[in-house]
Amino acid sequence: MAHLLVTGGAGFIGANFVRRALAADPGGRLTVLDALTYAGNRANLAEVADRIRFVPGDVCDAELVDGLVRDCDVVVHFAAESHVDNSLHDPRPFLRSNVEGTFVLLEAVRRHDRRLHHISTDEVFGSLPLHGSERFTEDSRYDPSSPYSATKAAADMLVRAWVRAYGVRATLSYCANNYGPYQNVEKFLPRQITNVLLGRRPKLYGTGENVREWTHVDDHNDAVLRIVADGRPGETYLIGSGAQWSNRALLELTLSLLGRPVDDYDTVPDRPGHDLRYAVDSGRIRRELGWRPRHPDLPEGLARTIDWYRCNEWWWRPQKDATEARYLAIGR
Ligand code: NAD
Ligand code: TDX
């Protein structure tokens, strides 16, 4: 079977992808390249450590990347700075990892004629009106609102140009918000779950009306595996479960699953440029590649995710205080 190179494989989605890819292809060869930033953690890969090659390193390191790409068949590119609030505070690492890192990878796949799957995000399309049924499609206009989404959009543009100019065999996917085990405590759901587990009050930005479409990380990764297997080079795919929730409603559900009163949270100042609503039309991947979310029931998936955080305090506790100190510094 194909030898996969997974960049960012020690992060939330990447590490879940590595486990899923090995489950789908038990004899498969897989190499992870990860810079182990604050968001990367080798413990995320402990269960599969003896079945993969782990290379600590930066996607911007052209020499290292060239050798790894030469030795693999397919690159799945997750590595990125991924948190909007961090990007608002300090955009520079986002430009480097997300834009320059993608450029370095593209040059290597071009030199060695390797297949690339690039992981993008629905955030590159900006914000949908709060009240309405519109959804992003593969043809939506790019309209990023944060340094994070601007750098993801820039990376997508590079991938698209390398496909057209050099015939690079790349696919792109845009997934809505993910949730599940091993997600960094800076993100919405893990932040609130771990706050409650520590007896602290969750923090809701602004009015909490903003809507996100929540997809279980295993469903996102199943979709990526399908694209890697059967996706058409040059094609783009949107991935989403269809489960749209306002932040307020999702926080109330989280509190009730944790046995707390649903109004036991604080509101904090809103995120600047806060996108109102994300929702994607995932019709193409459903029709063309037969993908369906296997965990479409968000309350059920959230209950399992809460259990995971309850049982794995050893994993999230060491990051929690530094994360909250960063939030305190920006007033959220
Ligand atoms: P994450 O922050 O949990 O993990 C990112 C990983 O990339 C970490 O292991 C980090 O060490 C690594 N990394 C960062 N910069 C690197 C560099 N220069 N070189 C090598 N490794 C580097 O992020 P995530 O939530 O798992 O997101 C993974 C990808 O999926 C990102 O490209 C993100 O834009 C995209 N995405 C995320 C979501 C979501 O809801 N989390 C939704 C859609 C798309
Ligand atoms: O404490 C919080 N309170 C709050 O109300 C946090 C951390 C967030 N929020 C809000 C902001 C968003 O409307 O919750 C929503 C979700 O926030 P994040 O988890 O930061 O995700 P988001 O900004 O929507 O981006 C996510 O989805 C798309 C990922 O972090 C990105 O990597 C992905 O591309």
Image (cartoon, rainbow, N blue to C red):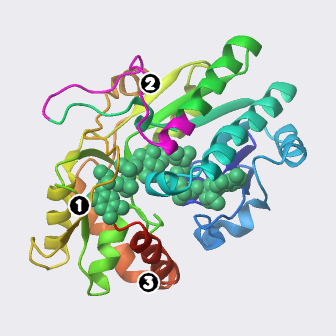
Eyeballing the image, is 283 above or below 18?
Answer: above
* Residue 19 image position (x, y, % from top left): 57, 58
Give the class, few, some or many, for how many residues have Cα within 10 Å of label 2's Cα (few <14, many ≥20).
some
The residue type indicated by label 3 comes to: Glu
Q: Quadrant of residue 46?
A: bottom right
- Is residue 159 shown left or right of residue 73? left
Give the overall secondary structure of the magenta segment: loop
User: Viewer-proximal residue, 126 or 314?
Assistant: 126
Looking at the picture, does residue 106 appear above or below residue 315? above
Question: What amino acid type is highlighted by mark number 2?
Answer: Tyr
Name which residue type carries label 1: Glu
Residue segment shown in magenta = 131-152
Residue receiving disc 1:
300
The residue that appears at 76% across and 61% down in the rendered structure is 54
Q: Which tag, 2 or 1, sits closer to the chain's start?
A: 2
Along the horizontal axis of the image, is 25 left or right of 320? right
Percent coordinates x, y for residue 240 in the rendering: 34, 38
Question: Measured from the top left, where is residue 196 in percent x and y?
Answer: 26, 80
Q: Secondary structure at mark 3?
A: helix
Mark 3 vs 1, N-terminal side: 1
Front label number (3 vs 1): 3
Label 3 lies in ligand 1 vicinity (Cβ under 8 Å): no
Marks 2/1: CA distance?
33 Å
Q: Secondary structure at mark 2?
A: loop
The earlier-in-sequence mark between 2 and 3 is: 2
Pair 2/1: label in front: 2
Residue in the foreground of this view, choosing between 293 and 251: 251
What's the mark number on residue 313?
Answer: 3
